Amino acid sequence: MTCHELDERLDDWVDGALAGAEAQAVESHLAGCAACRERERQLRQLLAHAAALPRSLAPQRDLWPGIAERIERGSAWSAWASWHTLGIAAAALVLGLAAFLWNDAGPRAVRTVAMPVASPSLRAVADTAVSDPVLAAAAREYEAAASALLEALQRRRGVLPPEDLARVEANLQVIDRALEEVRQALVKDPASPELNRMLVATHRKKVDVLRRVVRLSTAL
Amino acid sequence: MKPAAVVLAIVFAVPAWVAAQTTVDQKRPAAPDGAVTIENMAGSVKVTGWDKAEVQVRGSVGDGGELSFTGSSKRTHIEIESDRNPMGVKSDLEVFVPAGSSVAVEGFQATISVSGVVGSVSAETVNGSISQTGAAKLVELQSVNGDIDAAKGSGRIKAEAVNGSVVVRDSSGDLEASTVHGKLHVIGGSYDRAQIESVAGPVRFEANLSGRATLSIETVSGSVDLLLPATISAEFQVSSFSGHISNELGPAAEKPNKWTPQTEITFTTGSGGARITAETLSGAIGIRKRPQPGDPKKTEEK
């Protein structure tokens, strides 16, 4: 197993999701590679910190600056760092949202999400309804991640074939339209846990798509 | 252009193109369960599992590219290297690996196909299709614009496309599949867990579930078509914010309140066991009885 292959499995390893030969391969690589052991230690530490976040604490807002630069640099460490920074941030987001949704199972407060890409009128409606700082911060984090990745993608314009970029952009528009549709529904039913979960899942999908394209484009 | 000029252009252009390609055919010894990584940014990669303890690469390398074929018996790395933009170096590689290998293929404008590998398979490309056939224990396939076709996998399967379609056939075990815009079809096979997500692409699930399986499907505007055996034992939780729900296996959908257009159904068939959830925002949801052998034939939906 290479360091690169280990990186790809590190999340699952730390989550205890690996078994059999794959787990043995990771264990054996870690036993012989100090650099990967250090990355494992750092990941466990970061996850422990994320897990310890109280529900009222918004995810760190400064996680995203520099993501694009690190991706651009293209070194093994930067690739690892960008992936895992995203992973840690997502974990923090998920914790916040899980807390929100859990809390939402009780008496329902009126909550919804403000998204920077929403139409001005819709955003105004959504903004007035935001009452949960964790959810609002989570939404901002996703937007910040998407923006950082879009910037990184823009910088690859000279390298990527224009038709591929056009297709990626068309697909991002599909996701944006879906986000808009979910937001419209949230205006009608802001307390719906299903809609809130759908909003987050759709937003995560946008970040996933961008992350994948940017990561692969760094190999060019 | 006159026909004679076209013929001349072809006569001179084809040999020049052929000359620009370099033919390769190389072998290395490899462990039966080693790792094989392949990077080819443009062109195609075809991987086949075989019973020999060696990796063989053959095919053509595009002008300006060079085949790097390195590693040890436990790890083999194959890469098309180039000083120029690799998108302009189109190489077509056919790679034979020991069947028990863990294979990882990465491309950008490349089509990828893998067959006969029973270790693990990971394949990723942006603009190209991916197909995988064989009982690999771990399968991860990701494409942005291309279609994904995974067949006969067993164990853990993950398939993600954005614009392309995802079709998973005759597989079993644990499935995670998602698309943004393309269709997502799960046809045949039996699953212990299936998690399916789509933003706008239509989802069709026409497979079996084990006794305690969980199936979860979520879309925003994509439709959901569930074709299940009439005898299935499962608990269903189905809801849509504004999409229509039709149900051949249980009661009709109801509106839980008068303030939103949401409709939902919760019901159990047989003695329960499997758990099925489906949620959409505006996509229609259809729960239908799957035709069984001997049933009167209906017109097949395209």
Image (cartoon, coloured by chain):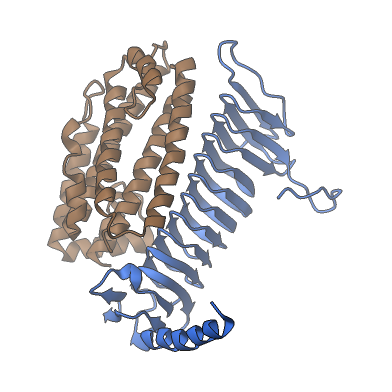
Chain colours: A brown, B blue
Q: Where is residue B134 in the image (x, y as percent from the top left)?
A: 53, 67
Q: In which quarter of the image is residue A199?
A: top left
Q: Which residue occupies the foreground of this view, B143 or A122?
A: A122
Residue for point 28% across, 60% down: A159
Q: Quadrant of residue B24?
A: bottom left
Asked whether residue B52 appears in the rendered view, the answer is no
Q: Which residue occupies the foreground of this view, B158 or B38?
A: B38
Asked whether residue B68 appears in the rendered view, the answer is yes
Residue A184 to residue B297: above or below: above
Q: Which residue occupies the foreground of this view, B185 or A40?
A: B185
Q: Where is residue A66 in the image (x, y as percent from the top left)?
A: 16, 44
Residue A81 to residue B35: above or below: above
Q: Position of residue B266 (x, y in %)?
A: 62, 25
Q: Where is residue B273 in the image (x, y as percent from the top left)?
A: 61, 37
Q: Give the side of residue A212 with respect to residue B173, left or right.
A: left
Residue for point 36% across, 50% down: A17
Q: Give the side of residue B10 with respect to residue A128, left or right.
A: right
Residue A51 to residue B182: above or below: above
Q: Quadrant of residue B15?
A: bottom left
Residue for point 30% across, 34% down: A142
Q: How many marks?
A: 0
Q: Give the side of residue B155 with respect to residue A148, left or right.
A: right
Q: Which residue occupies the foreground of this view, B68 or B247?
A: B68
